[in-house]
Image: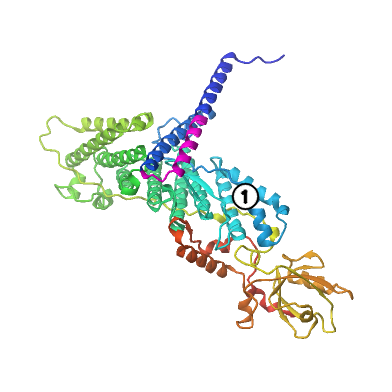
């Protein structure tokens, strides 16, 4: 018999469908508004109008972000970012991904292939479409390891795209469009560096989302959150160190510095949570350690708050972020005083055996020494311990109240019940401890407790992206080895030469692999007669493509020719025509990472000297990257010894 459908579940589903449809309509409306505002933003030269439109864009984009989040919440049974465990975790700050427009590279790349490489562009449509599909997929990566790998794969593919299709002196004429991740203001540039930088930014942003989703009530979730935020810090830091003159604010040096610091602070907060999970908290030294960890978290969050308050960042960072960071800074300051108090009030006075160790720990605990008796007396006298504990609690309560006051100033945070709960729970806990140790007959004035010295047992690491973990093969491999067939090299049109073998062979020496090089031509020999020149590369033998062929393969093809002779296809690189003047080996050394690096540097200098340098994003690629690449352009010096006469 057929199973009936639960009518209640059915109505719930149709309700969901209606809400989805409504949100999608709103999203479409906002998208139309965005398109209109963008056109105005580009068209107007009036500064006032531009500012107004930018403001309108940021509203439209934050609406879009909220609508999309609402849609995401509908599409997943639980809240997207925060976990569903019983215990309360303080929310973390995740970043939204930068959005980009579709890009059609079919015509520009086909044109470049026929103009620069002299090949039929239409024969490479499959590769171009594959590249465009990869780009399309990386616009919406999944929030997991697979999504990260997708972004890495695309980033690594851009290395090849750059080498194949972006000569140092001109661009492809294609614009890369990306939106600012916080304001949604659009930017576009022809420089491929802008595309690379934006992908790197999204790699960092995706790590923040993965970090914010972890269930931090348990150790595995905490360790994953720490790893994710460390990698996010690494991606933003790498971006800051390798790019400059970004056209959008989210990738400016000031914003990236702020994001790196924010991620480091979130790591430090997770380290504190890890300590509370791992340590038996009823022991004196463990509580001192927790107090110092909390002071360390307060320290890093106040640094983030300072960074967010700087001129170029202040108006740009969402108010809810600045408030959250300030709230956390006050909250952890309160916790450091609270743990100091319970270490003093809830732990028994030390035995003689424990005294020395506790005294040593306590010596480095406060920023300045507490007033009153010596440490040894203090530690052994319960009444003195209670006095100092009370002073710490007084400061804790003041800080809890400050955290709650700041939290109340921000409308968005007020909606965050989780944060509210955490703050009020901590406040009540300190209040009840205070009333427990407060004696009615206390006649002494509670002193001012000194600050706690920040100290952590696990320093956050900034983990740079490891691009080599995702292996990619050059999609445009068929164009030939990158050492010769790249955008920066130019060569004369390919020549077909018919060679007969003389008594002394063909009359040339060959060297190297993929492509094989004619290293020397004997005057008056067959090769010289046929017009072959020193420095020519062999690209085909009897119509068989030899661009990727090894030395031995080419020799084999030549040796197997009969009396009718052999057809050889060769090219000459422009600029390598007069190797006599220089050392022969150097003249043909057009491969190897050394060359790549210097060329990058030169192209960088020529960009810097051009008029539009200020708007160009300059990509100063480290030579390390070129070593990691997977193309097999073997430096000729490595194979120079197997030069032989044929």
Q: Is residue 279 visible?
A: no
Question: Overall secondary structure of the magenta stretch?
Answer: helix
Q: Nearer the viewer, residue 103 or 219?
A: 103
- The residue at which mark 1 appears reads as 105
Could you tell whether 34 is left or right of 491 in the image? left
Q: Position of residue 62 (x, y in %)?
A: 43, 35
Left or right of 328? Residue 27 is right
In this rendering, the answer to whether 190 lies above or below 444 is: below
With 108 as the anchor, is 526 left or right in this view? right
Is residue 38 shown in magenta?
yes
Residue beneath the point at 31% across and 48% down: 311
Q: Position of residue 339 (x, y in %)?
A: 28, 40
For numbered disc 1, what is the local secondary structure? loop
Residue 341 in the image: state x and y as whole percent: 24, 39
Q: How many marks?
A: 1
Q: Quadrant of the C terminus?
A: bottom right
Which quadrant is the N terminus positioned in? top right
Q: Residue furthest right?
A: 563
Could one spot residue 519 in this view of the protein? Answer: yes
* Residue 482 magenta-highlighted: no
Residue at the image position 12 percent from the left and 33 percent from the top: 442
Q: Residue furthest left?
A: 443
Q: Quadrant of residue 478?
A: bottom right
Q: Is residue 194 above or below residue 28?
A: below
Magenta stretch bounds: 27-47
- How far from the left and from the top, in percent, is residue 127? 68, 51
Foreground pick, 390 / 546: 546
Mark 1 burial class by Cα count in 10 Å: few <14, some 14-19, many 20+ = some
Q: Residue at x 30, y 30 (%)?
A: 424
Describe the colour scheme in one phrase. rainbow
């Amino acid at each position: 018999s057929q199973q009936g459908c639960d009518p209640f579940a059915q109505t719930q589903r149709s309700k969901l469908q209606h809400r989805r449809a409504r949100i999608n309509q709103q999203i479409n409306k906002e998208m139309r508004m965005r398109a209109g505002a963008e056109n105005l933003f580009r068209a107007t030269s009036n500064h006032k109008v531009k500012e107004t439109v930018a403001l309108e864009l940021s509203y439209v984009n934050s609406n879009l972000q909220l609508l999309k989040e609402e849609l995401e919440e509908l599409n997943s049974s639980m809240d997207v970012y925060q976990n569903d465990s019983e215990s309360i975790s303080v929310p973390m700050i995740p970043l939204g991904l930068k959005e980009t427009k579709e890009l059609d590279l079919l015509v520009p790349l086909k044109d470049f292939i026929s103009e620069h490489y002299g090949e039929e562009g239409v024969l490479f449509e499959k590769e171009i479409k594959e590249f465009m599909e990869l780009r399309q997929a990386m616009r919406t990566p999944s929030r997991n390891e697979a999504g990260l790998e997708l972004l890495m794969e695309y980033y690594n593919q851009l290395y090849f795209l750059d080498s194949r299709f972006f000569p140092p002196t001109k661009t492809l004429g294609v614009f890369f469009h990306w939106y600012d991740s916080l304001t949604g203001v659009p930017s576009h540039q022809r420089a491929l560096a802008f595309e690379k930088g934006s992908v790197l930014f999204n790699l960092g942003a995706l790590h923040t989302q993965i970090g914010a989703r972890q269930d931090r009530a348990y150790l595995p979730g905490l360790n994953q959150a720490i790893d994710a935020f460390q990698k996010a810090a690494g991606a933003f830091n790498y971006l800051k160190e390798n790019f400059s003159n970004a056209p959008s604010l989210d990738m400016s040096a000031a914003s990236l510095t702020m994001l790196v610091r924010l991620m480091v602070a979130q790591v430090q907060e997770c380290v504190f949570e890890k300590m509370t999970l791992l340590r038996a908290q009823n022991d004196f030294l463990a509580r001192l350690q927790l107090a110092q960890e909390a002071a360390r978290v307060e320290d890093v969050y106040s640094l983030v708050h300072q960074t967010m308050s700087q001129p170029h960042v202040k108006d740009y960072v969402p108010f809810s972020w600045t408030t959250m960071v300030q709230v956390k800074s006050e909250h952890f300051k309160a916790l450091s005083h609270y743990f100091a108090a319970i270490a003093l009030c809830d732990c028994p006075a030390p035995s003689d055996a424990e005294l020395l160790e506790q005294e040593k720990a306590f010596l480095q605990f406060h920023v300045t020494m507490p007033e009153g008796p010596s440490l040894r007396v203090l530690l052994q006298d319960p009444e003195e311990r209670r006095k100092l504990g009370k002073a710490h609690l007084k400061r804790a309560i003041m800080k809890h109240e400050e955290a709650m006051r700041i939290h109340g100033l921000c409308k968005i945070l007020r909606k965050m019940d989780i944060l509210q709960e955490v703050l009020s729970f901590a406040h009540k806990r300190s209040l009840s401890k205070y009333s427990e140790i407060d004696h009615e007959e206390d006649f002494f004035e509670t002193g001012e407790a000194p600050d706690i010295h920040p100290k952590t047992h696990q320093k956050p690491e900034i983990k740079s992206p490891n691009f080599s973990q995702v292996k990619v093969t050059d999609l445009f491999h068929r164009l030939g080895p990158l050492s010769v067939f790249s955008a920066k090299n130019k060569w004369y049109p390919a020549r077909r030469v018919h060679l007969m073998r003389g008594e002394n062979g063909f009359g040339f020496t060959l060297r190297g692999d993929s492509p094989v090089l004619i290293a020397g031509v004997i005057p008056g020999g067959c090769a010289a007669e046929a017009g072959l020149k020193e420095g020519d590369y062999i690209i085909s033998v009897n119509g068989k493509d030899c661009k990727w062929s090894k030395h031995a393969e080419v020799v084999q093809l030549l040796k197997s020719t009969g009396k009718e002779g052999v057809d050889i296809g060769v090219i000459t690189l422009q600029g390598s025509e007069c190797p006599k003047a220089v050392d022969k080996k150097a003249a043909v050394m057009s491969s190897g990472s050394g060359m790549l690096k210097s060329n990058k540097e030169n192209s960088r200098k020529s960009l810097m000297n051009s008029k539009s340098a200020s708007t160009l994003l300059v990509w100063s690629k480290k030579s390390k990257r070129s070593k990691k690449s997977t193309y097999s352009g073997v430096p000729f010096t490595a194979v120079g010894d197997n030069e032989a006469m044929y």
